[in-house]
Image (tube, rainbow, N blue to C red):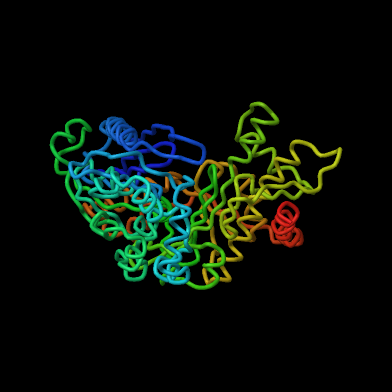
Amino acid sequence: MSVLGIDVGSSGCKASVVDAEGRIVGQAYREYALVSPAPGMQEIEPELVWRAAKDVIARAVGLARRTAAPVRAISVSSFGESVVPLARDGSVIRNALMYIDARGAEEARMIGEAVGERRVHAITGAPVHSMYSLSKILWLKRNEADTYGRAWKFLLLADFILFRLGARPCTDFSLAARTQAFDVVAKAWSPEMLDGAGVDEGKLGESVLSGTVIGELGRGLAEELGIPAGALLVAGGHDQPCAALGAGVIGPGIAVDGLGTTECVTPAFDKPVINEATARSGFACVPHVVAGLYVTYAFTFTCGSLLKWYRDGFRGAGDFDLLVGEAAAEGTSLLLLPHFAGAATPYMDSGAVGAIIGLTIETTGRDIARAILEGVTYEMMVNVERLAEAGIAVDELRAVGGLSRSAAYLQLKADMMGRRISTLDVPEAGTLGVAMLAGVASGLFPSLGGAVASLVRKKRDFEPDMKAHARYMDRFGAYKRMYPAVKGILRG
């Protein structure tokens, strides 16, 4: 028996077939593009995502067929917030609004006023924000009444793919928490939030625990995809907690560190953490895909994207991994504020801008590249400090994503943060996490804990040089003064 994990991202989707030993025996990826009808508007075409999902499933299964037993269960993860409006016959009514779409700001304000901002945070575990699904649905109700009226269900992207595969319309707890319509403590849709927005609960999917069997693959699609009919369809989750599961983050003190275009640190904890400190820093409280646990997200809007900006704009071209290695090996006296696309946690300031301090006539390109690596790490150090203030410990980071390939960068990161950074044998933590959910539901693995124990293996530990850490901490205070200083200069 093998299982299939699918991860639906904002720019592409990936499928991985995982066997009983945890090996990825077949994998495929396909990109797609967002749609921008006008400035400030960003949408995704659900039918395009569905075609891409079918393509990567069929290709991954085809590759796995040579060495693995047939796929017996399928689970899906996806990014959050964006919802697909479906008619009763299952057809897509319109494109889904992305979380970065500007629409919904006025509606978020209205919901905050109707329910009360403190109350919203207490129920949903997150401050009022326009990126969440509820604000987007209310925008549709106010501006596209026909779309809202025709909508039978609003499903998140993972739910939509599972529904198209044959599952009943469901939303797991971790994705439901990204709608701002879900009570993260009661783990149920919140009548108070829905009433405040004037949105009908019947238009949402059934809320279920990740790992719940919610359907079976039908014969027609089974033949098209190369999977036996009757394969179980299993509720997955939000991409970040699925990646946390795939990295073995199933207890307090450990976090997965996704190092890609952006950076996201996802720690786990064993009870809801919803307090003034989390509200002040924009940290959401989200049910983990592991029953009984919660996670939060400390994230940036830039990471690898800043190195790409430097490479493409100032070097023109070049090997990206070589650039990272060169930058990590060079010291610099520069300080860089990495808010080139606004600031995420703990500031949640979309108007924030980046800055470089300390430039001289002797400054080199390698100085700037090194400052980028240090700047994005200092930014995450601010986040980890704020997490500790909220009562969430991060003692060890497990690195995944493209930048986790650089040993030099991970050693720099360990030294700066004063924490162990580990890499894993299987870097595809996201699809491995949802494959674990499918594997437990189908009996391939005895439990999620058992799956983690047998499938998640460290590849290398990077221990911090505490003398180097002390030197970085001397500069950390100066770094923390950069954001308020730059904000004060530009906004008065």
Q: Position of residue 338 (x, y in %)?
A: 65, 48
Q: Residue at x 42, y 57 (%)?
A: 248
Closest to the observer, 257 or 425 = 257
Asked whether residue 468 appears in the rendered view, the answer is: no
Number of dots carrying numbers: 0
Q: Is residue 404 left or right of residue 194?
A: right
Where 356 sits versus 120, above or below?
above
Say which quarter of the image contains residue 146: top left
Closest to the observer, 321 or 39 = 39
Q: Residue at x 39, y 69 (%)?
A: 123
In the rendered image, which quarter contains the N terminus?
top left
Q: Position of residue 232 (x, y in %)?
A: 19, 48
Where 481 sits versus 353, above or below?
below
Say which quarter of the image contains residue 29: top left
Q: Position of residue 396 (x, y in %)?
A: 54, 60
In the rendered image, which quarter contains the C terminus?
bottom right
Asked whether residue 459 appears in the rendered view, the answer is: yes
